[in-house]
Amino acid sequence: MSALHDLRPASDALGQLVANLPAERLTGPTPSEGYRVGDLLEHIDGLSAGLQSAAHKTPVAPEDLRDGDAAQLRPDWRQRVPTQLTELALAWAEPSAWEGETVQGGVPLPAPVAGMFVLDELIVHGWELARATGQPFTPRETDVRALLDFLSSLPPMEEADGLFGPPVPVAKSAPDLDRLIGLTGRDPAWEAAPAQG
């Protein structure tokens, strides 16, 4: 894994999805069972602020410890979350963010591992939000391949402390993004029903 990975393209892509998210989709389903779009958005809100702490190697602010609850989503999300995502990428653009050890989700980790988990959050949740809201999403191939290499080097997902669901079987000939999504326990064929007009 590279010592320093540029998170800006992935954070920009997710920020654009949030900025363009149709408000009527907030109650719609996502590829993660039991998670509505508003829940996913609130989770992205929390991680976009909280994961900056891992880069700075400081404790996470209590208000950023959120698991995804649409009822807790503040009304200024459309402007605030993309800004936080930009700040997240800038925090991880500092070489010091990738050095030594940090804490992420209460778990001590080597900083390069934590940084790759941030990239995973950006791309996997970007894919989920795009699929759930009918928006296009094309992450950088280099990011997707880097994540495939990284996640494939970890213990089987069932043993990875609940970070992912059981892998969904995907053909080896499938596109890299589909293979990544399947590896993280989502069905790459999932699509939301069209919005009612």
Image (tube, helix red, strand yellow):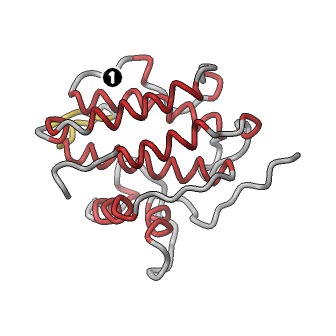
Furthest toward the bottom, the residue is 173
Give the number of callouts: 1
Q: Is residue 163 above or below residue 1?
A: above
Q: Quadrant of the N terminus?
A: bottom left
Q: In the visual, does 11 lie left or right of 98? A: right
- The residue lying at 44 percent from left, 17 percent from top is 63
- From the top left corner, tell me how far across and down residue 29 is, in percent: 70, 46
User: Where does the image place residue 55, in percent across and percent down from the top left?
Assistant: 25, 33
Question: Which amino acid does the dot numbered 1 rest on?
Answer: Val
Residue depicted at 57% across the width and 65% down the height:
188
User: Looking at the image, which is closer to me, 137 or 71?
Assistant: 137
Q: Can you give x and y, in whole percent of width and height, for residue 95 in the image?
A: 15, 39
Instruction: Please identify the residue farthest to the top as the structure is shown.
Output: 62
Mark 1 neighbour density, 10 Å: few (under 14) some (14–19) many (20 or more): many
Helix or strand or loop: what does disc 1 sit on?
loop
Q: Quadrant of residue 75?
A: top right
Q: Going by the image, does 186 lie left or right of 144?
A: right
Is 6 on the left or on the right of 133, as rendered? left
Does 161 appear above or below 49? Answer: below
Name the residue: 50% across, 35% down. Answer: 44
**On screen, residue 4 above or below 22:** below
Residue identified by numbered label 1: 60
Residue 167 in the image: state x and y as whole percent: 47, 64
Q: Which image quadrant is residue 79 in?
A: top right
Q: Residue furthest right?
A: 197
Of residue 94 and residue 163, the one placed in the foreground of this image is: 94
